[in-house]
């Protein structure tokens, strides 16, 4: 997995979420990095319109 500080504005990513009750159930959410600077976590706008930060504990990958 790449380091968070390699993310740049405009990068497309997928973030993995696990169901807390059933760790085997996972879902990938796609989005675009809309802000990435050294003073905060990268901010991603998911395709469904939600905003989320990419944190070190999260599983994510870039997509093309």
Image (cartoon, rainbow, N blue to C red):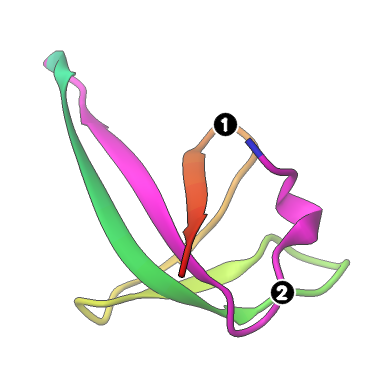
Question: Quick check: 12 above or below 61?
Answer: below
**Residue 12 lies in the magenta stretch:** yes
Q: Nearer the viewer, residue 38 or 47?
A: 47
For the view shown, which residue lies furthest in the right direction?
38
- The image quadrant where one finds the N terminus is top right
Residue placed farthest to the front in the image? 64
Helix, strand or loop at mark 1: loop
Q: Is residue 56 left or right of residue 24?
A: right
Q: Earlier in the sequence, mark 2 or mark 1?
A: 2
Image x and y of residue 64, in percent: 46, 70
Label 2 secondary element:
loop
Q: Which residue is mark 2?
A: 8
As displayed, is residue 50 above or below residue 41?
below
Quadrant location of residue 35? bottom right
Residue ID at (26%, 82%): 49
Q: Quadrant of residue 22?
A: top left
Q: Residues within 10 Å of mark 1 (few under 14, many from 20)?
A: few
Residue at 60% x, 45% y is 55
Residue at (76%, 65%) from the top-left corner?
40
- Viewer-closest of 19 and 15: 15
Residue 29: where, in percent of width, then height? 27, 57
Which contiguous range is marked in magenta? 2-21
Q: Which mark is residue 16?
A: none
């Amino acid at each position: 997995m790449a380091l968070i500080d390699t993310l740049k504005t405009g990068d497309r990513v997928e973030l993995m979420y696990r169901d807390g009750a059933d760790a085997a159930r996972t879902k990938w959410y796609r989005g675009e990095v809309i802000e990435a600077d050294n003073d905060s976590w990268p901010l991603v706008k998911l395709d469904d319109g939600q905003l989320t930060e990419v944190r070190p504990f999260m599983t994510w990958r870039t997509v093309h």
